[in-house]
Amino acid sequence: MDSSLISARVCFASGSHARVLTGGREWDALLAGHLEFSALTASELPVTGDHVLARPIDAATMLIEQVLPRRTALSRRAAGTRQAEQVLAANVDLAFLVTGLDGDFNPRRLERYLALAHEGGVEPILVLNKADTCLALAERLDEARAVAGGAPVLPVSALSGDGCDAVEALLTPGTTAVLLGSSGAGKSTLLNRLTGSEVHLTGAVRASDSRGRYTTTHRELIPLASGAALIDTPGLREIQLWVGRAALATVFDEIAALALECRFADCAHVSEPGCAVRGHVAPERLDSFHKLTREADRLERPRSEKARWRALHEAQKQFYKQRGR
Ligand SMILES: Nc1nc2c(ncn2[C@@H]2O[C@H](COP(=O)(O)OP(=O)(O)OP(=O)(O)O)[C@@H](O)[C@H]2O)c(=O)[nH]1
Ligand SMILES: [Mg+2]
Ligand SMILES: [Zn+2]
């Protein structure tokens, strides 16, 4: 390896500008031209949480030469009609799916966030925030547990600090966690609570519908004193899925289990006789399963890197075989 290359972690990325952490300090960073030219899609460019190899070009600036393979990645389908992946954060261990226990609470949206986490290989934790304002906490907890698929459900108040020790306990040294959720759910408030500072801006929600004002504007990785790292993100306006059926089977694990008892192996749980799912799962839950399955099936996701190489290799073998004849 080129000895002038240093490994660093991306704490912010936007277009061809980024910031990276290495050697206990933060650097401005630029992308090497060859990175931008050779990237087949935007998803290959550095994102918050990426480990990269970079070269110092002056006392304050690094040039990012290489993005190291991602251990995990949280992606959604990018906005717009074109089918493309948008990587939200990389090399994340835990996803804190933050929901306000006000008008924000929505089990159907939680299912989407859970699918996104499972697809990315990231362990989801449901964080039900604003417990201080909620008069039906036990009910909300039950509703959340019903869709959690076994993921922990933690009621907290980022404002008062109640319950936050359970979140903090998960932030062991070396762990990277991301805060995901609607604008106004209280992600930055929770971050401030966990860092014991008020450095990250928070903004009031609209009283009529509990919606936030998109106070946080970019994804940023913040190193914590514990040796963990936490990524704050702007509230997602929409979570268009970039997932396959396997992630959905994890989210809807009780449906996957019941389906083993359906009379037909390819039962779609719509109107088939002998269906073990229909009638045994809440109708809105089954509707949601169908909806997300259709959404996943509509995606034309590029094959994985491995599959791409295998295909190339196969094509090459065929080429030599034909030429040899
Ligand atoms: N009552 C109550 N209010 C809270 C709690 N946590 C956050 N809030 C309030 O909710 C509002 C939104 O909080 P933020 O932390 O800015 O929300 P956010 O998720 O970071 O929002 P974006 O940055 O827009 O995505 C602020 O007015 C917070 O004071 C809580 O536990 N209880
Ligand atoms: Mg915020
Ligand atoms: Zn069935």
Image (cartoon, rainbow, N blue to C red):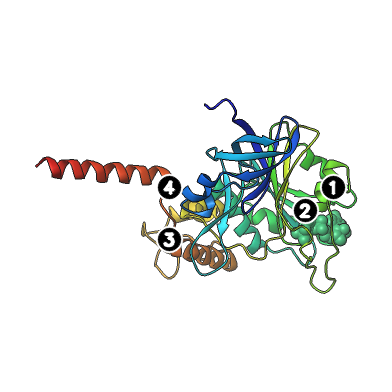
Q: Quadrant of ligand 1?
A: bottom right
Confirm if mark 4 falls within 8 A of ligand 3.
no
The numbered dot on residue 192 is 1
What amino acid type should be assigned to the residue bearing mark 4?
Ser
- Left or right of residue 264: residue 114: right
The numbered dot on residue 300 is 3
Relative to 324, is 140 above or below? below
Q: Residue at x 31, y 46 (%)?
A: 311
Q: Residue at x 60, y 40 (%)?
A: 64
Tell me the residue that label 4 is attached to. 304
Figure label count = 4
Confirm if mark 1 falls within 8 A of ligand 1.
yes
> Residue 45: x percent and y percent?
56, 48
In three-dimensional space, the C-alpha distance between marks 1 and 2, rounded to whole angstroms, equals 9 Å
Mark 4 or mark 2, whichever is nearer to me = 4
Q: Which residue is at the front of the view, 198 or 6? A: 6
- Left or right of residue 128: residue 300: left
Element type where label 1 sits in the image: helix
Do labels 2 and 3 touch, CB within 8 Å?
no
- Left or right of residue 189: residue 16: left
What amino acid type should be assigned to the residue bearing mark 3?
Glu
Label 1 neighbourhood size at 10 Å, few (<14), some (14-19), many (20+)?
A: some
Q: Earlier in the sequence, mark 4 or mark 2?
A: 2
What amino acid type should be assigned to the residue bearing mark 1?
Asn
Tell me the residue that label 2 is attached to. 187
Label 4 neighbourhood size at 10 Å, few (<14), some (14-19), many (20+)?
A: few
Q: Which residue is at the front of the view, 15 or 207? A: 15
Q: Earlier in the sequence, mark 1 or mark 2?
A: 2
Give the farthest residue toward the front.
58
Is residue 131 in view?
Answer: no
Do labels 1 and 3 touch, CB within 8 Å?
no
Confirm if mark 2 falls within 8 A of ligand 1.
yes
